[in-house]
Amino acid sequence: MFVDPKVIEFFTKEMILVQVNGDRVDTALAGQYCVAAFPTLVLMDKDGKEIDRVAGYLPPEEFMQTFRDYTKGVGTIADLVAKSKDSTSREYSLQIAERYKYTCDKAAAEQWYNKVIAAGDPLDSLSGECRSSIADMYSRAKRFDDAIAAYRKIIADFEGKQIADDSRQAIGYVYVRAKKYDDAIAEFKQIAATFKGKQPATDADMNVGYVYRSMKDTAKAIAAYEYWLTIYPQADSSDIAYAKKQIDRLKNPPAPKPEEKK
């Protein structure tokens, strides 16, 4: 799991590490701890009570110091909430909301996001970021109608800004998560027609391939990516490379991995 010698030593001498494959094998355990992103490391005390967690990657030194601080009650959510009583900073409240987002307490995350919005202009960039995060939480919680409604309200309130464009694409992703693939394709095609010649259209046409991939319709996914390459020959080189990579993966899928044992 870890390759840095210092981190390996850290978990050998200072912590007891239990590795769980929550993505493929121990999905029930991942669900129990509300793990929504990988990797996620949950720090527990000797009684099995969660102290705090780290979702995602950190540089080795910062990673180890974070866990050392957590054992002292420094930098934990509880610590941040206690200190927030002396702060009027919206950014500080946002930090707490982001931390709660990756725990089981989604209600607390939404509460803190709304606190950020209430403390400023509901139409400024920070409020838009919070509203987008709330919509994303709805989607991950399978509250698909709420997520779509939230994204559509963002589009209405932030028309002409990047967050509105991102929200349009996000609605398509919500439909995919809900397995409403026809709705997802219709959404992306509507974006492509509305914003023809602009970046949202480029992204939306690419995402049609993603929908077919999610449907496991290999032939249509390949056709969608190949079509994208023909209509966007001058697209960003990284996007072209991505489309070609998807085509190659679809045409030459890797051998299936052997099933892991619990």
Image (tube, grey):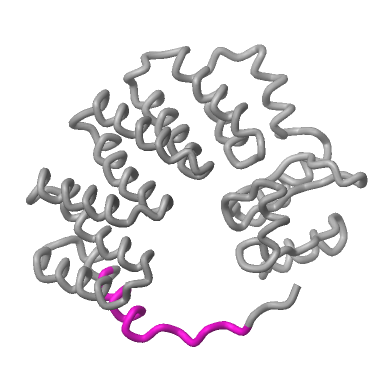
106, above or below 199, in the image: above
| Magenta span includes 257 | yes
Please provide percent x and percent y for residue 8.
Answer: 76, 66
Q: Is residue 222 left or right of residue 150?
A: left
Assign the C terminus to one quadrant of the image: bottom right
In which quadrant of the rendered view does residue 242 lie? bottom left
How many marks the image carries: the answer is 0
Residue occupying the point 24% across, 40% down: 165
In front: 182, or 225? 182
153, above or below 136, in the image: above
Please provide percent x and percent y for residue 26.
Answer: 70, 63
Residue occupying the point 37% across, 14% down: 121
Residue occupying the point 22% across, 70% down: 225
In front: 207, or 74? 207
Q: Is residue 254 left or right of residue 103?
A: left
Assign the N terminus to one quadrant of the image: bottom right
- The residue segment tinted magenta is 243-258
121, above or below 246, in the image: above
225, above or below 85, in the image: below
| Magenta span includes 180 | no
In which quadrant of the rendered view does residue 85 lie? top right
Residue occupying the point 60% across, 42% down: 102
In front: 146, or 60? 146
Please provide percent x and percent y for residue 5.
Answer: 72, 68
Quick one: which residue is furthest to the right in this view?
Answer: 46
Q: Is residue 259 left or right of residue 143?
A: right
Please provide percent x and percent y for residue 32.
Answer: 72, 49
Q: Is residue 5 left or right of residue 126?
A: right
